[in-house]
Image (tube, coloured by chain):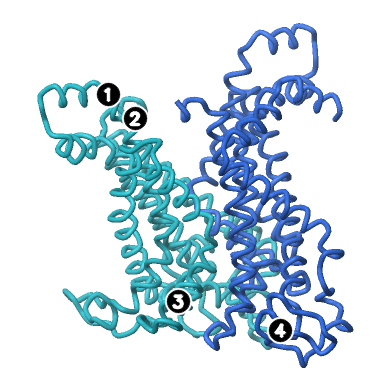
Chain colours: A cyan, B blue
Amino acid sequence: MTAFVIRRLLQALAVLFVTSVIVFAGVYAIGDPLEILLPADATMAEREQVTRSLGLDKPLIVQYGLFLWNALHGDLGTSFVYNQPSISIILQRLPATLELAFSALFLSIIIGIPLGLWSGLRRGTTVDETIMTGSILGFSLPNFWQGMMLIMIFSVYLGWLPSTGRGQTGTIFGVETSFATWDGIRHLILPAVNLSLAKIALVIRLTRAGVQETMPLDFIKFARARGLSSRRIVLVHVLKNILIPIITVIGVEFGSLIAFAVVTETIFSWPGVGKLIIDSIRVLDRPIVVAYILVVVTMFITINLIVDILYSILDPRIRSKAQ
Amino acid sequence: MSALTLRLLGNGMLSTALNGIFASTKATIAFVVCLILVFAAIFAPWLAPQNPYDLMQIDFFDARLPPLSKSMSGMTYWLGTDTQGRDMLSAMLYGLRTSLGVGLLAGFLALAVGSALGLLAAYARGRLDALIMRIVDLMLGFPTILIALLILAILGQGTWKVILALVLVQWAYFARAARGAALVEVNKDYVEAARCLGLGWGRILFSHLLPNCLPPLMVIGTIQIANAIATEATLSFLGIGLPITEPSLGLLISNGYQVLLAGLYWISVFPGLLLLTLVFSINIVGDRLREVFNPRLAA
């Protein structure tokens, strides 16, 4: 087990290293770093200073070392727009995005699993066909357009929910969150639904596939022979078995929710990192872009690592396979 | 090329695919819709009531007209006009042309690059295989939108840059599928026979292995074209995709987003419906193809 964890940890570090090389190569080596890192109206003195502080006169490998050194010390440059260290701006905005992603994840589980179970147990019927076609529709719906339609229907025509912004936040256990106030929750509903729709479709498909694989197995037949009710078989025996792969995929998908929050946050003017990165790309605020990518990739790798380790605890077969 | 086509027909893959599609009503409808949309995209300049990007044909006084309005000159704007006075139907047909063109081009380039690398990995094995698959795993570990954002943040905007980003995002799916299929094929007798005949690896790869690995690639290809279209639309909506000079459906929807709250729903709703119809029907066809070529799922 320890060997497995250490090996995965080394792999994760390798991926992080590769990403840092790519980001470095992309932002510092391919483009002109002076043009990228300096505002257009920079003076000669400022140019001089940046050239020296970045060590642009040194060989590329030394430059990369410097970049890595600064990054490891939390220095990923200063935003031109906000005039603050880019990393602290990202960290300020991150909680709003995490809140959105968690809400979407929650929705996709409580809606996706029951629908997937229903569809899988009623294979080949109209119910199954409808749910499956619905799930294809779910991931065919362009995320941004679907969000606009939600705003149009629920904010403009029905006037039930607010269309943009995060609303009032309150504090629960010292964490600032929208869940604390009714206004906050009302603001959260539409963005969360928008972000979750494609994931609901995914969870439905996974659950249905799991049900189909599990139902013909011997232990289900045995459970039936023991006279257990269908309800108990499905809710306890089947569900327990298909939950492992679902949890794994959901864990990995959490990272993609954070990435896709870019779209949702842009439409709903949600003040998270996603909206920040799009605004920053548009105005060429590269230090923010670098910080965003490195932070998100690090989160991603950490999540994958945790999921892998959890998976190997839940399913010992994985461990032996890896050895 | 003709030899390859003949072999495909000989394999009966195309007829299997078509028979499979026509056996399902849902897939048949979706397939016909796809064909109609491709036709509409190709002939957009002749089908569209006006050329929406010829300033001579646009009347600014016709801006923001709701669907079914008449223009000063008596032309009917079936789907209304946008804030510049363009006929929405025409703009959508031209947008469809751009979206479909970019999606298909990116899809096929990714197919070519990805399957070549996947076949090579399966055939060469050893270090090359390990290297290619490591990169594939790395790419597949991250969501497409994040990689596309990274690439476009570095490269900047532009049609070819978007296509490059889409290819870089998607080749890994093809590589994985091609390698998976080729690993099964590579041990079969015909490959051994080809090797004994002293054929070069390029010939074995592309005229012996490739045709036998096509079914899974076709399934992935269909779905990835839908993904490419949706991703391009998303990037264009976010303002980091195609330039304004080549308005795809995503950009049209983005224009509509500015005026949605003012109640001008048709500027974003209709292009969105068209995009949805396009992506949805390609996905339905892809889903059907997967059932046809993967009997394990259909069982």
Which residue lies under the disc numbered 3?
Answer: A153
Which chain does the residue under circle 4 lie in?
B
Which residue lies under the disc numbered 4?
Answer: B69
Residue under the image location 58 percent in, 63 percent down: B149
* Quarter of the figure with the C terminus of chain A: top left
> Looking at numbered disc 2 in the image, what kind of residue is underneath it?
Glu
Q: Position of residue B28 (x, y in %)?
A: 62, 42
Q: Position of residue A299 (x, y in %)?
A: 39, 58
Which residue lies under the disc numbered 1?
Answer: A217
Q: Is residue B221 visible?
A: yes
* Quarter of the figure with the N terminus of chain A: top left
Which label belongs to residue A213? 2
Pointers 3 and 1 in contact (CB under 8 A)? no
Q: Secondary structure at mark 1?
A: loop
> Looking at numbered disc 4 in the image, what kind of residue is underneath it?
Ser
Q: Are marks 3 and 4 on the same chain?
A: no
Which chain does the residue under circle 1 lie in?
A
